Image (cartoon, rainbow, N blue to C red):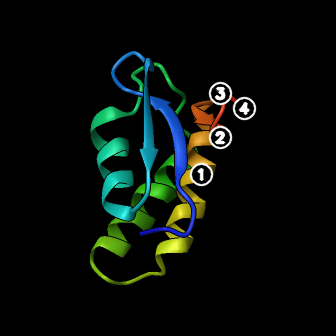
């Protein structure tokens, strides 16, 4: 588990709010729930690789959290607990 959860607006059309609390959920959201129309740039690729590394036990989970946040910011789906950023 991460020290602090990450809130994203994802799902097929970006209409579902997810509270991501660990590497496994972050990987699931990135691979299965990332909105189709959300931009996918370099931060997205870096986060996917970092999450994969963590799933294989090769990284710090908090480092993966930071890259997941960067990818969510890049795609415009990162939220505050109360609503969109």
Residue located beneath label 4 in the image:
85
Circles 2 and 4: CB distance less than 8 Å? yes
Q: Residue at x 32, y 83 (%)?
A: 57
Q: Nearer the viewer, mark 1 or mark 3?
A: 3
Label 1, label 3: how far apart the Cα atoms are:
15 Å
N-term mark: 2 or 4: 2
Circles 1 and 2: CB distance less than 8 Å? yes
Pick the residue in front: 74 or 79.
Answer: 79
Residue located beneath label 1 in the image:
69
N-term mark: 2 or 3: 2
Q: Residues within 10 Å of mark 2 (few under 14, many from 20)?
A: some
N-term mark: 1 or 3: 1
**Residue 83: mark in rendering:** 3
Name the image quarter holding residue 62: bottom right
Label 4, label 1: how far apart the Cα atoms are:
12 Å
Q: Secondary structure at mark 1?
A: helix
N-term mark: 4 or 1: 1
Is residue 42 something that shows in the picture? no
Q: Nearer the viewer, mark 2 or mark 4?
A: 4
Q: Residue at x 46, y 19 (%)?
A: 37
Query: Residue 35 placed where, x, y %?
Result: 42, 25
């Amino acid at each position: 588990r991460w020290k602090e959860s990450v809130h994203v607006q994802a799902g097929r059309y970006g209409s579902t709010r997810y509270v991501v609390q660990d590497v496994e959920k972050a990987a699931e959201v990135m691979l299965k729930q990332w909105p189709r129309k959300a931009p996918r740039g370099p931060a997205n690729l870096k986060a996917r690789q970092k999450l994969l590394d963590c799933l294989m036990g090769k990284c710090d989970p908090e480092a993966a959290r930071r890259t997941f946040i960067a990818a969510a910011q890049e795609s415009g789906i990162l939220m505050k607990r109360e609503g969109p950023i």
